Image (tube, helix red, strand yellow):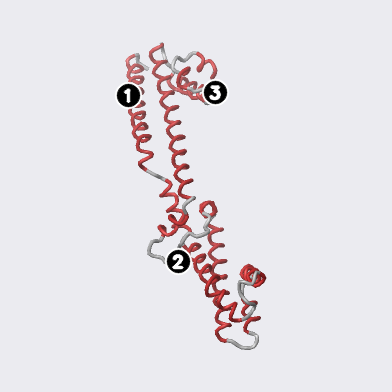
Amino acid sequence: MRFNALKHGILSKLVVLAHEDHAEFADLLAALIEEHRPAGMTERHLIEELATIIWRKRRVLLAEGAKINEGLKSAVNSPKSVIPSAAPFQGGLTGENADLRELLDATPEEIAERQRDAALDLAATQKAAAILRKGGPNAYTKARRALIQDSRDWWDEHVEEESYPATAKGLAEFIRESLEPICTRMVKEAEYTPAIKAQTLGEGLKPHLLEKLNRYETHLDRKFERTLAMLLKLKDLRGV
């Protein structure tokens, strides 16, 4: 029945584009025919008109989603702009080396884990710095051991590359110049991840790009109301 509904519709041949699902439109038209049970060509035409309006509204939603995705693509490629804007009165949110795609995909559990890990990393870094300030014969070894594994590995890479000497002074400089600022930034990014996600989505949603689609959707809504009113009036006149 669904293919017959499509085959015999005058508007159906024009509204469904070659790349669209003809069977899906046929199901839609068949469902409307089943609901309203038209008597005669006029009512049948009005029902087909309803189907085409619904089909066009489907296209509007697809176009809206595409526009939003386009905006999001632009936003996620600009972390240095988006992230500082998410918390404009917070220092240290630079967006440097941040992956907004990863942040957007993060679940609440992953965000909580990210916040815990960042806090632990910063605490370990500050503990190592405190050990170095206190000094002592084993300060370097104790401070290095106080770092989390990733930070320790990063320090060892710097030593191998001779960026810093493997001394208490060298480690203190590394912590002050590189490690602690990064840990602080990661803590802030983790803390403000929900705000960063909201900012990214907000910047991706560009109302001015959707305005024409919204006006067209309003036009379709009004057309649907008028068409349905005419159909119901005809059915009322024949006492249905």
Name the side, left or right, on which 81 lies relative to 124.
left
Judge depth for marks 1 and 2 and give the one in front: 2
Residue shown at 59% from the left, 77% from the top: 171
Q: Tell me the quadrant of the picture where the N terminus can be found.
A: top right
In front of the other: label 3 or label 1? 3
The residue under label 2 is 92
Q: Are marks 3 and 1 in contact (CB under 8 Å)?
A: no
Q: Earlier in the sequence, mark 2 or mark 3?
A: 3
Mark 3 or mark 1: which comes first in sequence? 3
Instruction: Compare residues 104 and 91 and report the one nearer the observer.
Output: 91
The disc placed on residue 23 is 3
**Res 212 → quadrant:** top left
Q: Can you say whether 201 is above or below 60 in the image?
A: below
Relative depth, front residue between 220 and 81: 81
Question: Label 1: few (<14), some or many (≥20) within 10 Å?
Answer: few
Q: Is residue 55 above or below residue 90?
A: above
Q: Residues within 10 Å of mark 2 (few under 14, many from 20)?
A: some
> Please, is residue 208 above or below residue 13 in the view?
below
The alpha-carbon separation of the residues under discs 3 and 1 comes to 26 Å
The alpha-carbon separation of the residues under discs 2 and 3 comes to 55 Å
Nearest-to-viewer mark from 2 and 3: 2
Q: Quadrant of the C terminus?
A: top left
Count of picture labels: 3
Which SS class for mark 3?
A: helix
Residue 205 in the image, given as x and y percentages of width and height: 41, 45
Find numbered disc 2 in the image and state the secondary structure of the residue it sits on: loop
Residue behind mark 1: 226
Q: What residue type is disc 2 on?
A: Gly
